[in-house]
Image: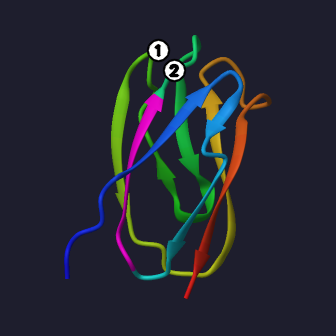
């Protein structure tokens, strides 16, 4: 079986692009997170304890994880300034 290509997700002041992504339970997810916003942000998936380092404007990070449950899980782009103003999106994990 061929490895899946990394998916790119962009963070900016306007939100995530794309805002929602779908993946399969038990299959490795590989993301390239690109911060195109002015503020330093980290990419967070609380339901899977996934957190990137803080990314400055223009920086990218590679994230890999294997979802072990199904459902809809929020993703966040938290700034270093406040946890009260995160970007919000979601990952949908199916069987």
Q: Which of 61 and 4 is in front in this view?
A: 4
Do the numbered discs 1 and 2 sit on residues whose CB atoms are within 8 Å?
yes
Q: Position of residue 50 (x, y in %)?
A: 48, 54
Q: Where is residue 26 in the image (x, y as percent from the top left)?
A: 41, 82
Distance, label 1 to label 2, CA atoms, is 5 Å
Quadrant in the picture for the N terminus = bottom left
**Which residue is at 20% across, 75% downward?**
2
- The relative height of residue 83 versus residue 6 in the rendered view (above or below) is above
Find residue 29 and report its image quarter: bottom left
Give, as a single range, the part of the protein colored magenta.
27-34
Which numbered disc, 1 or 2, marks the residue that appears first in the sequence?
A: 2
Quadrant in the picture for the C terminus = bottom right
- The relative height of residue 6 versus residue 13 in the rendered view (above or below) is below
On the rendered structure, is 52 left or right of 10? left
Q: Does the magenta stretch include residue 31?
A: yes
The residue beneath circle 1 is 57
Extreme residue in the top direction = 38
**Which residue is at 35% across, 36% downward?**
61
On the rendered structure, is 20 left or right of 69? right
**Residue 68 marker:** none
Q: Position of residue 49 (x, y in %)?
A: 52, 58
Q: Is the magenta stretch mostly helix, strand or loop?
A: strand
- The relative height of residue 18 versus residue 36 in the rendered view (above or below) is below
The residue beneath circle 2 is 36
């Amino acid at each position: 079986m061929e490895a899946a290509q990394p998916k790119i997700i962009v963070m900016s002041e306007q939100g995530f692009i794309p805002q929602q992504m779908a993946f399969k339970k038990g299959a490795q997810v590989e993301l390239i997170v690109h911060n195109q916003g002015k503020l330093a942000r980290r990419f967070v998936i609380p339901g899977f304890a996934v957190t990137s380092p803080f990314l400055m404007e223009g920086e990218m990070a590679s994230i890999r994880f294997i979802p072990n449950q199904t459902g809809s899980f929020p993703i966040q782009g938290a700034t270093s300034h406040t946890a009260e103003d995160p970007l919000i999106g979601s990952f949908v994990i199916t069987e």
